[in-house]
Amino acid sequence: MTLFNPGQSDTSSSLALNLAVSVLVLLFAYVLVHTFYIRRIPSDAPPVVRGNYPLAGAISFWTHRWDFCRRARDTTATGNFSFHAGPNTLVGLSGEKGRKLFFENRSLGFQEGYAVLFGASPKLDKAKDIDNHPEEEGNINHFSRRVTHLLKNEQFRKKLPTLISDVKEGIEAIKNDPSGTTNPFESVYRIVFRLTIRMVGAFEMAEDPVLLEQTLQLFEMIDRSATATAVMFPKFPSPAILKRQYAGARLYMMVEKIAKQRADTGEKHDDALQYMLDCGDRMFKIIESILGGLFAGLLNSGINAAWVLCFLATSPEWLAKARDEVRTTAAKYASNPNAPLHDQLDDVPLEAWESEFPVVDMCLRDSIRLNLLGTTFRKNISGKPIPTGNGTEVIPTDAFVTYSIADVHHDPAIYPDPQKWDPSRYLPDRAEDKKTPHAFLGWGVARHPCLGMRFAKLEQNIITAYFLAAFDFSLLDAKGNAMTVPPQIDINGHSAHKPKPAPILKVTSREK
């Protein structure tokens, strides 16, 4: 029989207490070393913001991004500031001088910035020679080459009838909804997704509604994985990281299965997947290219296509201008001028779709200005500090650099009443986007123009034109009440996003 010994209990408690104290001391020591030595921001970098906490960094950067950047900008002499995002040192730039440095400097790497700060770990060799355009090597160069081919004029011309057919099928689905309403952030968003898959994905994905929906769900799972936790603690298997890995693996297997079926049957399709297979691309490169195309072509285009319709629904003046433009262009090319407007549009050639919808283009442009949210990233890959042009202030070696889009897109000195949707900003007599260098960032600027701009405008023109031809429509809130203005866009968002709760469009079919 073993008798209870009070001394053993006291000894165990003492050991446990000593162990706990030791762990806390070690943790405290680690935080001190990490904060004041490992993560120390050089004295010649821009001032460090308040609220830059040990380990986590500036939490407000994740919760209220524009408010954080605006406060930090307004509290420093140069408008530039430093902070941490987890283990990463960031420098925020602002103003015209900072904007030009951010978008024009060859030593600020595009891919290197996004690889880490979008929640993915980079696998890059350190740049050795900045003059050799290292940011265009590897994945970026591969992606650019593939997208450049896929968005050539001949590809647009071949795929235009299919793109129009996809849009009309999406419009017909809206028309057949017995509720007489549609949530454009789902219905129109899905039209854009299908068009994007047509250009950067696989025929089988675009043709099979079940496969198309599965692809969309996997893509959105990957998109949601770029969380603060994933960036601050990249080696911690957080739910977001695990979901991203799961979605990536599922997408890999999906595309690999399609490729294997084609190889087994000898079947080929004139699509992006076949082009990359014929080029000998490895499957992981193909997946990277498809995801890159979706990120570039869906988030902004899909959200903005829906917002443009919401803005038009509450702006009788611009709705009338846009519809007149659609009528005029359709009548110019219609083989049967007495046909319904949506049938007349079938005869509009590619060149007209791209050049004869300036009103729709201005509507899209101001929607992009309002919805291009959050910050864009770069990394100092030069191997040395980069002067900011403000005295001795520099961007430290290997530091990440960020610029808040709202710094220019919501600057009242450039865009008066900046939160108002107003396409007339871009009329020649106002030309607010030409007031200062890089005043409009929606299509990329300087060294990084948007490769997909032409396709984005084309699909926007087609979707808007056919929607205006098919429907009269008005805007309702989620409860079904009429809205005279669209809901306010959350300027603190990290990217274009679907509003919650989403407004809906009440639609009535037009015959003429």
Image (spheres, rainbow, N blue to C red):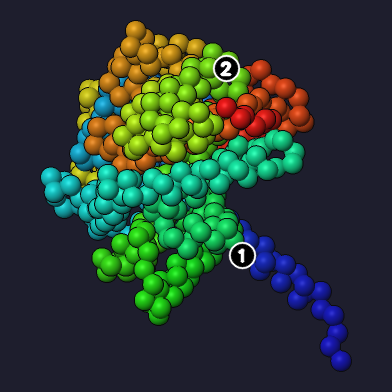
Q: Amino acid at mark 1?
A: Leu
- The mark closer to the camera, 1 or 2, is 2
Q: Position of residue 306 (x, y in %)?
A: 55, 34
Q: Residue at x 63, y 61 (%)?
A: 20
Is residue 275 in view?
Answer: yes
Quadrant of the drawing holding the C terminus: top right
| Residue 408 picture location, percent across and down | 39, 22
Name the residue nearer the viewer: 249 or 268: 268
Is 216 drawn above or below residue 323 in the view shown?
A: below
Residue type marked 2: Ser
Above or below residue 162? Residue 491 is above
The residue furthest top is 429
User: Residue at point 42% right, 31% down?
Assistant: 334
Task: Check the picture and name the quadrant holding the N terminus.
Answer: bottom right
In the rendered image, which residue does mark 2 sit on?
A: 315
Farthest bottom residue in view: 1
Of 12 and 226, nearer the camera is 226
Going from the N terminus, do you reach mark 1 or mark 2 first? 1
What x and y, as percent, mark residue 232?
48, 49
Could you tell me if residue 399 is visible in this image?
Answer: no
- The residue that label 1 is drawn on is 19
Is the residue 270 above or below the residue 42 in the image? below
CA–CA distance between discs 1 and 2?
A: 68 Å
Q: Residues within 10 Å of mark 1 (few under 14, many from 20)?
A: few
